[in-house]
Amino acid sequence: MRRGDIRRALLSALGDGPGHGYELINRLEERSGGVWRPSPGSVYPTLQMLEDEGLVRSEEREGKRVYELTEAGRTEAAESPPADDFAEHGPGRHRGLRAMRTAGEQIGPVLAPLVMAVRQLSMTANEDQMERGREILRRATKELNQILAES
């Protein structure tokens, strides 16, 4: 995930209402269909930066620091591209990965490393790398179907 994406994603998540850090992490994971879960190490510093910029304010509620958008934050969130798509570099463009991950969990440990590699690729790869990854998956699918045709 690129630096600007987490910023935009947090502004968008806060557009749904106030929340503490782990609530926001969970909202973003839900928006990505379970494909991406931002780390606390990226969320909390970004929240602090947004607060320093006056886009977010926080207060202690029931022992937790709860963040909410300021008027300036609402304006910036409204002017940004939709964060649930994570622009062209984020996990929103790979909605089918949730189904793939679920299938990997059902099939078991043989497929799990492949699913995790695809997940990592979807979060960090440039377009050339994504195309190479898609081609590998197309070839693997073709070969698996050839095995099935032998039965």
Image (tube, rainbow, N blue to C red):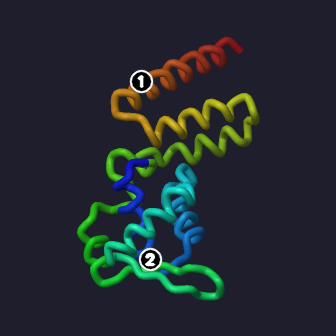
Determine which of the numbered discs, if any, sits on residue 64 in the image: none
Kindly identify which residue carries mark 2: 16
Residue at horizontal 42 percent and vertical 35 percent from the top: 125
Q: Position of residue 44 (x, y in %)?
A: 51, 65
Q: Position of residue 103 (x, y in %)?
A: 66, 41
Q: Quadrant of the C terminus?
A: top right
Q: Residue at x 53, y 38 (%)?
A: 120
**Circle nearer the N terminus (1, 2):** 2
Q: Residue furthest right?
A: 108
User: Is 27 on the left-hand or right-hand side of 62?
Assistant: left
Q: Which is nearer the eye, 72 or 97?
A: 72
In space, the residues marked 1 and 2 are separated at their CA atoms by 36 Å
Crowd around label 1: few <14 · some 14–19 · many ≥20 (10 Å): few
User: Looking at the image, is 79 positioned above or below residue 148?
Assistant: below
Q: Quadrant of residue 101?
A: top right
Judged from the image, the secondary structure of the residue bearing numbered disc 1 is helix
- Which residue, given by chain and number where applicable, does mark 1 sit on? 132
Residue 106, compared with residue 132, is above or below; it is below
Near-viewer residue (146 or 17): 17
Q: Quadrant of residue 64?
A: bottom right
As helix, strand or loop, the secondary structure at mark 2 comes to loop
Circle 2: residue type: Asp
Relative horizontal placement of residue 94, taking residue 64 as reference (left or right): left
